[in-house]
Amino acid sequence: MSGTSGSSSLTNASMLSIDERSFCVEFDLRMASRGIFLGDDPLKFAFPILLVQLGLVTFLSATFRLLLKPFRQPTFVADILGGIALGPSFLGHNEEFYRRIFPKESLIVLDVCGLLGILFFTFLVGMRTDVTVIKKAGGLSLVIGITSFCLPMLITRSLAVFLRSDVHMDRNLEFSLYALSFFQSVINFHGIYSILTELKLLNSELGRLALSSSMISTLCSGFFAVVVRTVNDARQGGGLSKRVEYLFNAHSITGKTLKEHYVCTLSLMVFAGILYCEVMGIEVVMGAIFLGMAVPGGPPLGLGLMDKLELFVSAVLLPSFIVNIGLKVDVYGITLNNFGKVELFILGAFLGKVVGAMVPSIYRKLPVVDAFLVGLLMSCQGFIDISFFSQAMSHKYVTKESFSIMVLMAILQAGIIKPLVRSLYDPSRKNMAYKRRTIQHSRRDTELRILACICHEDNVPAVINILEASNPTSVSPIGVYVLELVELVGQAMPLLINHQTNKTSHSNARSDRIVNAFSQYQIRNQGIVAVQCFTSIAPFVTIHDDICSLALEKITSLVIIPFQKFDSPALRVMQNKVLQMASCSVGILVDRAHGILNAPKTMSDSWFALHVCVIFIGGPDDREALAYGTRMAEHPNINITVIRIYEIGHKEFDLIETQLDLNAVNDFRIIHADNSRAVYKDVGVSEGPETAEVLHSLSEGFDLMLVGRRRDEALSLLMGLSQWCEVRELGVIGDMLTSSDYKSKASVLVVQQKASVVDDVTATSSIQLGSRQYL
C-alpha cells in the first residue's frame, strides 16, 4: 500500500523510497519458491526475481555490446544502456512489465546487492591504484592533474553563481547547482583506465600521461570531498599498507594461491571499514576506494584477492548496480528547459578539463593533437562517476532529472571519445626511422647497440651467449639494453623501471638475479660491453610500446626477443607488434632447451665456441642475417658456414634486389677470404621439396642458425613450403627449422631488417621495377 511517509502498525513493515516517493510496504517477500507445480509464482519470491532481473540486464548488456561492436564503443556504454533499457525509459515504461519484474518489495534486495556491487567494485579499483605514481609523476602530469580539476570547478561554480542570481529556474534545480558543479568537475581515473585498456594504449606515452594525471586529479577530488584524515589513514607513508602486507605476506608463499581464510579476513575488513565510514558520515564509495588503496595490489595478497572476488563482483553484484541505475534514469521526466541548464554545466566542465589539459601540454611542446586527446581522455566518466551521481540523488543533492541527464551525457561522452582517440592517435608513428637502423648499415668501427628482451630467467644464458657471439671489441664495442618483461597484475599503472636510477624501487628476487647476471657479463668484458637494465611492468598486449620506445630512444640496431611458442597468446601478439612497429631490425630467438646456447659460460670464456650457420636465399632480411653472421665470424672462437640456396634456371626480373644480394655475398667472401673458420657454399635447387631436403641435411653440426624472416613468395624453391608454415612470425624457413620434425639441437635466430621511411617511400614509388613480394 502506498502513501506519504508516516507511521504504520504493521509488524513486518518497512519504509521504501522509490522515485522520490515514500512507500510503506509490508515486507512479506519470502526467499525461495517451492515451484510452479505447488502453485507458487516464482516472480513473487526474492531469489527467483533477483535472478530474473540480473539475467535480463546481462542479456540486454550483451546484446548492446554485440550491436555496438562495429562502432568500437566502450563496454561501459553497453552495460549502462542495458540497465536503462530495463528501466522506465524503455521496457519499464510498461506498467505491467514494471510491476511484474520490479515489485516494490524486491527493490530492497536489489538495492542492497547493487550497493555491495559498487562498493566491492570501487574497493578493487582502489587496490589497482598505485599512489606512489604521484611521487614519481613528472611536472606535466602534476600540472595537468591539478588544472583539469580546478579549471572546470572554477567554470561551473561561476555558472552556478550566474544562473542562481540572473536566471529563473526550478527551485530544486537551483539548490543542486553547486553539487552539479562538483560532480561534473570530479575526475576518476578508473573511467580513463578502462578506455585506455580497451584502446590498448595503456603503455603508450599518451596513456601514461593521461593515467598519471587522472590519478592526481582523483586525489584532488578526494581531498575536496573527504576528510583529509581518511586519506592519510589509507596511504600516509604507506604505513597501513605495509602493516596489512606484512600481516598476510608473513604466512604466504610467493607463487601460491592465497588461502581462503585470508580472503575471508580481508572481506570482513572491507565490511568493517565500510561500516566505519557509514557510522562516521563518510561517503561509503570513497571509503571503499581508500580501503582498497590500503591493500597492496600486487601478488600474492592483492592478486589473490582479485582472483577470488573479481568474477563474482563483475558477474553478479555489478549487474545489480546497473539495474539500479537503469531504474533511476527516466528520459520521460526530462524537460527541455532544465536539460539546457544542466547541459550548460556539463559542457562547461568538459571544456574546462580539455583546456586544463591542453594548455600545459602545449606549453611543454606536446603536439596539439596529442594535447587535445589528453583533454578528451580526462573527460571520460565511468561506473564510479555514475555511482557518485546516484549517491548525490539519494541524498537529494541533485534532482532525478539532473541525474538522468548526467548519466545520458556520460554515455554520450564515452561513446564519442573512444572512437575519436582511436582515429586520431597512432602510437606507431613515433617509431618511424628516417635513418637505416640495421646491422648491415652500421659502421664496423662504431658501437653496436642491442636491445635484449627477457621474458623468463631461462632466457638469460642464451641471450648472454648471443651477445658474446656478437663479437664485442675495443674497435666496435656493444651497448646492451636489457629489458625484463613482466606482466602487469594487480596494479593499474604500467611502469618502466631503470635499474641504474631506481636500485631499490619495485625490486624483486627475479629482477635482481637477471640484473646480476648481466652485470657479471659486463664486468668480465670491461671496456667492450656496456649494460643497462630495465624492467617493463605492463599488460602483455601493450608491452610492445615499451620495447619500441626504448629501441627508438637508445638508437639500437637490433632488438632480440625470445620466442615463446607455448606461452600466452598475448606474448605472440607482442612479438607481432614489435615486428610491425620497431624502428630497427628485430631478431626472434628460438632457444633449444638442450642446445649449447642454453648452457651458461664460466667467468673465463676461453672455451666459448659456436658453429654458426647462415642460410641465405635472398632479400633484405637474409642480407641482415648475413651481415650479423659476418660480424660473428670475426670472433676467434666461432666457426661460420654460409649456405646460399639459389633456384636453378631462374630468370631474375628484379635486378636491383639481385644486385644487392650479390653485393652482400661478395662482401662476406672478401672480408673473410683469409678466414679458415668461415666457409661459403652454393646449393642449387629447383623446387620446394629439394629446399626442404637441403635444410634437413643441415640439422647436425651447428649450434646456432641465422635466417631471414621474409622472402620472395614467387620463388619456385619455396613452392609448397608456405602451406605448412604454422608460425607466421618466424617465416617459412624459420618455422621449418624450429618445428618438432626438424631434428636439431641448434638454436635459431630469425632476423627481420627494418627499412627507413625514405626506403619505404622509394620502394613504393618504384614498385613496377620488380615483382618481389615479401611475406
Image: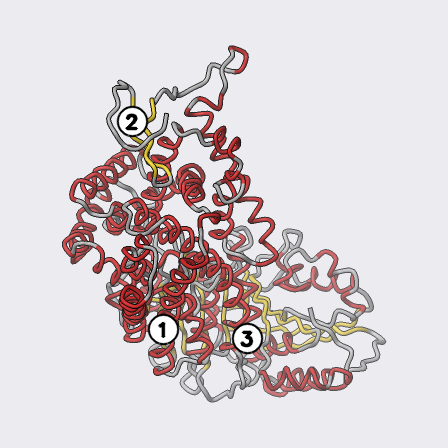
Report x, y in % for residue 409. 44, 58
Tell me the residue at 39%/34% (across/down): 110
Tell me the residue at 26%/23% (across/down): 8
- In the depicted structure, whether residue 27 falls above or below residue 155: above
Foreground of the two, 500 or 470: 500
Please name the residue that numbered disc 3 is placed on.
585
Q: In what element is the residue under mark 2? A: strand
Which one is earlier in the sequence, the residue at label 3 or at label 1?
A: 1
Report x, y in % for residue 238. 19, 55
Give the amino acid at mark 3.
Answer: Ser
Give the amino acid at mark 2.
Answer: Ser
Mark number, residue 14? 2
Which image quarter is the N terminus in?
top left
> Image quarter for residue 162?
bottom left
> Image quarter for residue 142?
bottom left
Q: Are marks 2 and 3 in contact (CB under 8 Å)?
A: no
Please name the residue that numbered disc 1 is placed on.
357
Query: Which circle, 2 or 3, is nearer the viewer?
Result: 2
Foreground of the two, 96 or 561: 96
Foreground of the two, 10 or 738: 10
Q: In what element is the residue under mark 3? A: strand
Q: CA distance from mark 3 to mark 1?
A: 36 Å
Q: Is residue 728 visible?
A: yes
Report x, y in % for residue 426. 52, 72
Q: Are marks 3 and 1 in contact (CB under 8 Å)?
A: no
Q: Are marks 1 and 2 in contact (CB under 8 Å)?
A: no
Give the amino acid at mark 1.
Answer: Ala
Which image quarter is the C terminus in?
bottom right
Mark 1 nearby-residue class (10 Å; few <14, some 14–19, many ≥20)? many
Report x, y in % for residue 590. 55, 60
Residue 325 lies left or right of residue 720; in this view the side is: left
